[in-house]
Amino acid sequence: MTSTAARAGVNRGASILDFILRIVAFLGTLVSAVTMGTTRERLPFFTQFLQFRAEYDDLPTFTFFVVANSIVCAYLVFSLALSVFHIIRSNAKKSRIILIFFDTAMLALLTAGASAAAAIVYLSHKGNAKANWFAICQQFNSFCERISGSLIGSFVGVVVFILLILLSAAALSRR
């Protein structure tokens, strides 16, 4: 086996790993967006006619989280085509550079959405007495469990994007 053939085999393996990681990130961002987007809870107050409610779209930060995860999820679907192209042609260079560029942009968007939502989730759990922000998670247990859980998939996506960028950079450096 020549050095070129061995390098092509390693690059093909990296391309297959890239494809698998993109599917993992797609699933994480999809589940996060759907979980957050369908989160709502209502609590009766004295009577059935007077209720308190908590919904994800009550806070613009959670709306941004859903939109950011949805955009990244859609991007991942489209990037799967390039990932398949890299499996077929493992020595493609320009398309890998394009993927690194867009992966970095999506990493920034996903990190911004997840971090902003994490700050609000923290305040929902702990509150802030100085700002008169009361912890709502004692009353809205299901709501808080779902918004906390939706962060997991998003942060998994962040880690996967970091791995994807490093993997693409390593594949480019082998050329």
Image (cartoon, rainbow, N blue to C red):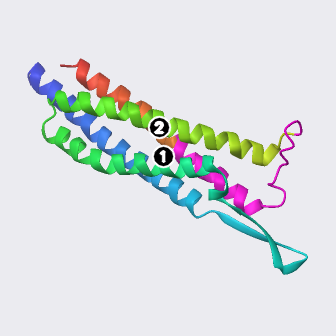
> Looking at the picture, does residue 80 appear above or below residue 17?
below
Mark 1 neighbour density, 10 Å: few (under 14) some (14–19) many (20 or more): many
Q: Earlier in the sequence, mark 1 or mark 2?
A: 1
Q: Quadrant of residue 91?
A: top left
Horizontal relation, residue 53 to residue 150: left or right: right
Q: Quadrant of residue 127?
A: top right
In contact (CB < 8 Å): disc 1 and disc 2: yes
State yes or no: residue 139 in magenta: yes
Q: Residue at x 41, y 37 (%)?
A: 106
Q: Residue at x 47, y 37 (%)?
A: 109
Q: Residue at x 32, y 51 (%)?
A: 77
Point out the image quarter for the C terminus: top left
**Mark 2: which amino acid?**
Leu
Residue 104: x %, y % from top left: 39, 30
Q: Which mark is residue 68?
A: 1
Residue to which mark 2 is pinned: 109
Q: Nearer the viewer, residue 145 or 72?
A: 72
Residue 147: x %, y % from top left: 65, 54
Q: Secondary structure at mark 1?
A: helix
**Mark 1: which amino acid?**
Ala
Horizontal relation, residue 134 to residue 30: left or right: right
Q: For marks 1 and 2, give the CA distance.
A: 6 Å
> Looking at the picture, does residue 109 appear above or below residue 125?
above
Q: Secondary structure at mark 2?
A: helix
Q: Residue farthest to the bottom?
A: 48
Point out the image quarter for the N terminus: top left
What is the span of residues highlighted in magenta in the rendered image?
A: 129-155
Q: Nearer the viewer, residue 121 or 26?
A: 121
Residue 71: x %, y % from top left: 41, 48
